[in-house]
Image: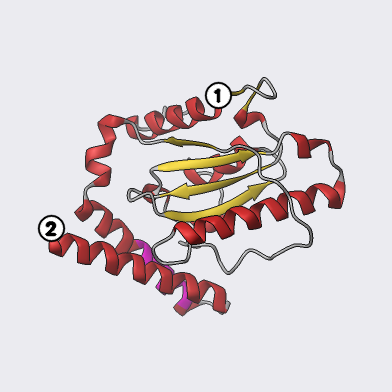
Amino acid sequence: MAKAPPGEVAKIRKAIRTFFDQVDPASGRKIGSAKCGIYAFHDYEDEPIYVGRSIESLRGRVGRHLTGRRSDAVGKFVLDPFEVLSIEVWPMFESEELEGERKKNAVNAAERRVFEGVLKESRFGAVLNEGEIPKPQGVVSLPPSWKGRIIPDDLYDERSHPDVRLARRAQTFANLARLISERAVSDDIRRTLFVQAQRLEYLAGRRLQE
């Protein structure tokens, strides 16, 4: 019989479920039920750190990143789920009716628009995605977004502590650097390492000033 997950993990999973169980008034559906959409992760300074898309299940795709299930971004040490304080999602209910390439193109165009938006918000002008998200042909209007915190209050103080975050960020940086040293990798993942270095330097400098 499988044991229940640790208390912290269970609380965060519950917060994620609560977030995705919110009902979109226009469609009358839970936002997590969207079969396609865009998502962005933000850290404890509300800095955007990652943008992604889903053409399967918005709830499932985000869950793979944040709850320990398979995720290439997490597996490659590009993204550390510990860094994520809040998530923002754009459920694309209307695009579910599209088929094949039309659906992919609509979601790709929306992802690019979100990507361009978060780059403007970022103090580094960059996120941790491996490379730029391609700019597709055509323009698409973004649906209303939903944003919420996934770290409960009783976990916030410890997880947000700069020394704890510095240790985690340094470990992620070291793991990514080790991965690069052991494998043939693209320039894009080296660029991600550079962004991680900037993020580590910023947090260390701010902590020193404090």
Q: Which amino acid does label 2 sit on?
A: Glu
Q: In this view, does 103 lie above or below 171?
A: above
Inter-mark Cα distance, 2 to 1: 39 Å
Which residue appears at 28% of the width and 31% of the height? 153
Q: In this view, does 123 lie above or below 4?
A: below
Write down the region rendered in magenta: 172-180
Question: Does the magenta-highlighted stretch encompass residue 51?
Answer: no
Q: Is residue 184 above or below residue 85?
A: below
Residue at numbered disc 1 = 21
Quarter of the image where one finds residue 63: top right
- Percent position of residue 189, x then y: 52, 72
Which residue appears at 65% of the width and 53% of the height? 111
Question: Which mark is drawn over residue 145?
Answer: none
Q: Which of marks 2 and 1 is nearer the N terminus?
A: 1
Question: Which mark is drawn over residue 210?
Answer: 2
Q: What residue type is labelled 1?
A: Asp
- Percent position of residue 122, x then y: 43, 60
